[in-house]
Image (spheres, rainbow, N blue to C red):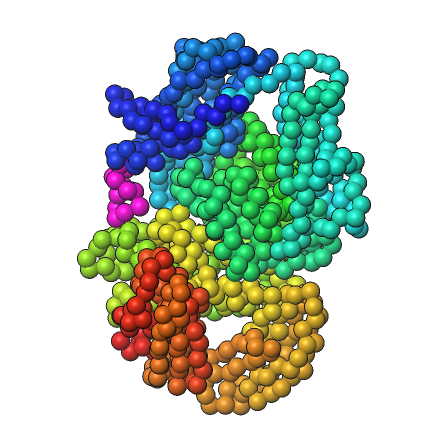
Amino acid sequence: MIDLSGAWTLRSGSESLPATVPGCVHTDLLSAGRLVDPFLGENEKAVAWVGRRDWTYEREISWDGEKPERIELVFEGLDTVADIWLGDVKLGSTRNMHRSYRFDVTALITDEPQTLRVHFTSAYTEAERVRAELGERPNAYPEPFNFIRKMACSFGWDWGPTLVTSGIWRPVRLEGWSTARLREVRALTTYRDGVGLIDVDATLDRTDERELQVKVLLDGREVGAEVPGIEPWNPRAPRLHDIAVVLLDGDTELDRWERRVGFRSVEIDTTDGAFLFRVNGEPVLVKGVNWIPDDIFPSRMTRERYAERLGAAAAAGVNLIRVWGGGIYESRDFYEVCDELGLMVWQDFLFACACYPEEEPIRSEVIAEARENVVRLSSHPSLVAWNGNNENLWLYRASGWDKQPGGSLTWGSDYYLSVLPAIMTELDPSRPYMAGSPWSGSWELEPNSPEAGTFHSWEVWNRQDYLHYRDSTPRFVAEFGWQAPPAWRTLRDAVADDPLLPDSPGVLHHQKAEDGNGKLARGLAAHFPAPRSTEAWHYLTQLNQVRAVRTGIEHWRSHWPHTAGTILWQLNDLWPVTSWAAIDGAGRRKPLYHELRRLYAPRALTIQPRDGGLVVAVMNDSPETWTGIVHAGAASLEVEVEPRSVSILPLEGEGFLLGGKGFLVAELDGVRALWFADDYSLDDPQLTVAADVVPGGLDVHVHAAGLARDILLQPDRIHPAATVSQGFVTLLPGESTTLCVRAPVPLDAGVVKAPWVLTDLASVLRS
Ligand code: BMA
């Protein structure tokens, strides 16, 4: 094997610069100092030319020493429209970022260096050509991403910039082999009653038809189709085993495929409209987040970065990650990290928010990419479901696409309802497949019906206040969310506007949603007086994001198992932007991140309005019964909440319980819920703040003599790399808390007194 990663040359016209593979044109231009940073200000517009150009990557290759029977040039990923040449021989052409490619170069390669050239045609040229050939089709965005098999969101999204790139985005190498190799291994490992079931299918490439042997080893020992005495892989309680598939020619090992697998069964119970995951027979409350590509240039992703982001999700109590269909099939690292963390993965096939042509040249690319990725990801225990598309079955009618120009052409339904399910049945019957998200299971109900299947809750945010989350109890909420700006420092680093205003040009450029700032403003107006500064706007919009998401999750979770899960839109961002994300584009945690930890805790309490009164919902998503006495206002109520269930305790007489204080507290075992009659109060919280210098940072002790709602410490205002242990914290009169600030440099205790480092709701509204 010869790894061809590393130094290449990038050319366009007469220009030539050093390049790095894996990588892409934008990152190479950036390293060469030929491009302004597209994340800053409005530079995105200034770099748009890059995506319209053609580019060529080049390097010399040779094969020294003895030649095996076959030598192949392997590209794990090419983005996207490429002609590949070795010397003056054309090896082939590609047009799909989501596939890998292998070219036989045995007869061509020698020990004399020859130039390997990968010539990329602009993705726009290809997409516009296909569009002209097949006919324009409706699309939620004005770019032609539905006419090319390339990460859709590189063409821009309502949280992302338009940065259409080209390049060799995954590893490339020369591989030599003789007699035979493992071309593809499909390994399905499931679980039933203490027995691990192994279904391995290996296909070979060979130069010789003689008989060969394939062995399957589990933890080093040869096994058959059933392995007794297995502990299953469970969400957030993963158990992994080493599997190896070995190809032998007598005693000679020809090839070996190694992975870590886990044994588990998974199904989605859809009885009577339900959408309930069962893993190893047990119902699972889904506490999910939606995942978008973590970098607009995904070649920059590393295993460390996946581990950091996914580790943060797991630490917040998340048990499922939905890989959204406008992004990519992620790298092996992504799924391995999920396998290890016990995070379930729901993987969309890559279709989002548009009509997709079902004709050539798209059709065979879709089939090839689906087949390759279903097999590639088959061994990962984390992968629990495949989904046909994001929102296409819904929007076709709901957005009136069927009535728009091109609406009578093919639009992708054949992929979602017949091509992909047939591929799943053939290649991976071990996992559930759903045609789309949202989808109610058939055309009998509207695809986004709350009555059946998955639901995307977007009336709230786009048109309604967040209190409307409580109006319905969908069977499963696969998307919902509320925007807020990124951390202050992230915004300030990206936007040089002076003055910096919610609607100054740079800030608006980093807000991609239709009327996004209008929606933020209307969302605020429903709950607070108008903010008097950009800082106050920033604080209040972040608070509103937390309150909105809290309202949704607490309501839906209290209806478990009728509502069987929530998947927050969205965990992450791929540049500095105002968006629905919990972790911003610079990797900083928004207050929402900290709130998720509370909302997705195994044991949680919430006070909910129900049937004209208030109830306490005691939500026990742990494997043990939760017993104790709930203290709620003047009431003491004994509860015994079964594992994985919710108990609803009605409270009599709201006025009495609020006791004139304007709030109600419910508490069980140190877990508590608060209910306020009003959104805010202007009373002075009478805070005392004392910071202790400790190893690694500061411990900030906050005491409230009065009621202090939504105290927030913004660590990025102390140091760009500082973190804090909590988000918004409410203290009742007489209570204290400690906020742990950690930073890579020594901090002075005085920093907590600087403006906007530590504040609270009443102080913000009074300022
Ligand atoms: C849904 C998602 C995304 C989008 C989000 C916010 O439509 O599937 O396409 O970013 O809502 O509008």
In the image, farthest residue toward the front = 695
Towards the viewer: 652 or 82: 82
The answer to whether 133 appears left or right of 420 in the picture is: left
Towards the viewer: 333 or 92: 333
* Residue 39 counted in the magenta span: yes
Tell me how many marks there are. 0
In the image, farthest residue toward the left = 498
Q: Residue 87 placed where, x, y %?
A: 41, 12
* Residue 663 counted in the magenta span: no
Would residue 535 be seen by someone viewing this image from the given angle?
yes
- Residue at the location (25% across, 48% down)? 41
Q: Residue 311 placed where, x, y %?
A: 51, 53
Would residue 465 be seen by someone viewing this image from the given angle?
no
Towards the viewer: 444 or 151: 151
The answer to whether 741 appears left or right of 311 in the picture is: left
Q: Residue 26 placed where, x, y %?
A: 33, 35
Q: Residue 433 placed where, x, y %?
A: 64, 43
On screen, 546 above or below 15? below
- Residue at the location (35% across, 81% down)? 688
Q: Quadrant of the C terminus?
A: bottom left
The answer to whether 84 appears left or right of 506 in the picture is: right
- Residue at the location (47% across, 46% down)? 304
- Residue at the location (50% across, 63% down)? 596
On screen, 238 above or below 636? above
Segment colored magenta: 35-48
What secondary structure do most residues of the magenta stretch adopt? Answer: loop
